[in-house]
Image (spheres, rainbow, N blue to C red):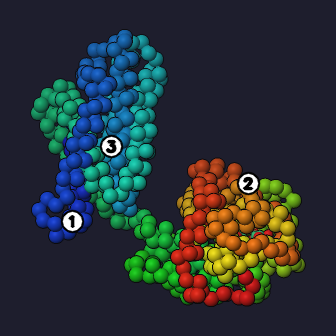
Amino acid sequence: MTGIAAGMMTSASLVLLVGEALKRLAVTYEGGGFMAGAWEVVLGMALGVVFFLVVSRWIGKHEHFDIAGLRKSGGLSAVLIVVAMTIHSFPEGVAVGVSYGTALREGSHAFGDVITLAIALHNIPEGTAIAVALRARGVGPWACVWWAIFSSIPQPIGAVPAAWAVWLFEPLLPAGMGFAAGAMMYLVITDLLPDAREHAGPTKAAVAFFVGLGLMIALGQVVALGTAFVSTIKRILVTGGAGFLGSHLCERLVDEGHDVICVDNFFTSQKSNVDHLLDKHNFELIRHDITHPLWLEVDEIYNLACPAAPGHYQYNPIKTMKTSVMGSINLLGLAKRCRAKIFQASTSEVYGDPEVHPQPESYRGAVNPIGPRACYDEGKRAAETLFMDYWRQNGVNIRIVRIFNTYGPRMHPYDGRVVSNFIRQALNGEDITVFGEGTQTRSFCYRDDLVEGFLRMMNGPDEFVGPVNIGNPGEFTIMELAELVIELTGSGSKIVHKPLPADDPMQRQPDISLAKKHLGGWEPTVPLREGLARTIEWFKSIDIGEYRAPTPNY
Ligand SMILES: O=C(O)[C@H]1O[C@H](OP(=O)(O)OP(=O)(O)OC[C@H]2O[C@@H](n3ccc(=O)[nH]c3=O)[C@H](O)[C@@H]2O)[C@H](O)[C@@H](O)[C@@H]1O
């Protein structure tokens, strides 16, 4: 078994990791000549070897890994063996993590899978050895099993941060691949092969080694074939994809390698938001209004299409209601036909002017169904109803998020919402228009935090369909916001008061416990001051003259 694992790990290290790293470098250093950039892999391998060497020295003698030696052990040495095995699992985990980090960055998990398999296989004799040593000491059979399993727990603990680190430092990938290869080869030479040889003799060890080599090459082929069939690349439709949030979502999805179809009618959005994506092979832009049916073949749909600023959605309230209701019906029908997963961008406005504070998802809201905001609030509520009914009645795979006030770069300068208005006014030296006394509150979430929440919700388990609040619980009065914008822009603008619009909610703050629980601990990371500074920089970088106000209501 150990001999086979040694063969598999050798093949994985040299063929998959080093081979692939050199292939990548050939692209990076195109035209750079023989061995261009290969030093990165060599350096990575050396680091991998040194890493294992240091760890092995630190935990003591190699005899502790010696499987034959374990059989003879008893008493204190058995405890030492468990400790040594447990600690030496850690660098193995790092090797697995580096391999997965590398593989996933490439859009496939094949590398990680084969290396995990090899390490897992090699865990079997190690775990058995621990069990044998403890059993000889009179430890009960189940306790032996537990200790055998426990000794491998450092593997995932080492693997997760290692994978993350590789992900973070993409340019170091070839060196990272070399690192994993070097670390594994060290393990093969110092640990696996001597064990195999001592156990089974040189001939059987050599045969097992070559069986392992062959097995891994065959497995690599099967995985490659399987990956081609079960591709991780999805065809994703984003409606409202040229808008403030939609364009950022498209960008994230394009970067992840998905085939993205952006649909927009450009009512409150701007083509320039997706200009930089137009020449990407995996991005497509369609001008279309979702109140009309759409015939496409997709795997996932993000429905973000709807004007969201009160002034613009009240400009043509019937159209706003149609966008939420007919748009949802059209897209849910598309999702049903394609068996696609579909995501609805709902809103904190479903809570109306809330009597419960902060607002949990279970709160049913206080919406005026006949007021000027109803076209949006009730439209979004009806959309939620439609989503839930398509889920219950037709088994459509849905997700609903309720977005709380969001801001950031690419907000339309004439959007009319409070953050864009205040920044535009401050930069132009105009009066800052605070509606009412400015004592009403809002909780402002930075765009990137929100889109991260979207992705986690869409990619989360099918059992959790929402609705879930996504927003920043940091609550501010509108007056505080005005003062902060003046401070950050260094503007001489004065604050003036205008009448409070009808049905304007007095307070709003999301309860995000549900998101934290179900979306892998998701929570906003960008504080208002920092997010506003970034947004102000973006506003300074654009030419407002290139933007056309969608309606006169801003
Ligand atoms: O920003 C958002 O994401 C939300 O914006 C609006 O909801 P609202 O909270 O009314 O957003 P704003 O128009 O930005 O108004 C926020 C507060 O600032 C006040 N405001 C707005 C604009 C302005 O120039 N001055 C001003 O004091 C408003 O009266 C309101 O109390 C939309 O209706 C929501 O669907 C959307 O989720």
- The quarter of the picture where the N terminus appears is top left
Label 3 sits on a secondary structure element that is helix
- Above or below for 478 versus 78: below
Instruction: Choose between 93 and 441: the one closer to the eye.
Output: 441
Q: Earlier in the sequence, mark 1 or mark 3?
A: 1
How crowded pointer 1 is (Cα within 10 Å; few <14, some 14-19, many 20+) is rated as: some
Q: Which residue is mark 1?
A: 29
Return the x and y of residue 551 as percentages of the image width and height: 71, 88
State the separation of the CA atoms marked 2 and 1: 50 Å
- The residue at 56%/61% (across/down) is 452
Query: Callout 2: few (<14), some (14-19), or many (20+) C-alpha neighbours within 10 Å?
Result: some
Say what amino acid the circle numbered 2 marks. Answer: Asp
Q: Which mark is residue 511?
A: 2
What is the quadrant of the C terminus in the image? bottom right
Residue 395 horizontal side relative to residue 313, left or right: left
Q: Residue at x 55, y 72 (%)?
A: 538
Foreground of the two, 41 or 158: 41
User: Can residue 295 be seen in this snapshot?
Assistant: no
Q: Mark 3 — residue?
A: 95
Left or right: 107 as drawn, with respect to 364: left
Which of 24 and 545 lies nearest the eye of the viewer? 545
In this rendering, the answer to whether 151 lies above or below 264 is above
- The picture quadrant for ligand 1 comes to bottom right
Real-space Cα distance between discs 1 and 3? 26 Å
Residue 164 in the image: state x and y as whole percent: 42, 50
Q: Name the secondary structure under disc 1.
A: loop
Q: Confirm or reject: label 1 Cβ below 8 Å from ligand 1.
A: no
Q: Looking at the picture, which amino acid does disc 3 mark?
A: Ala
In the rendered image, which quarter is residue 289 located in?
bottom right
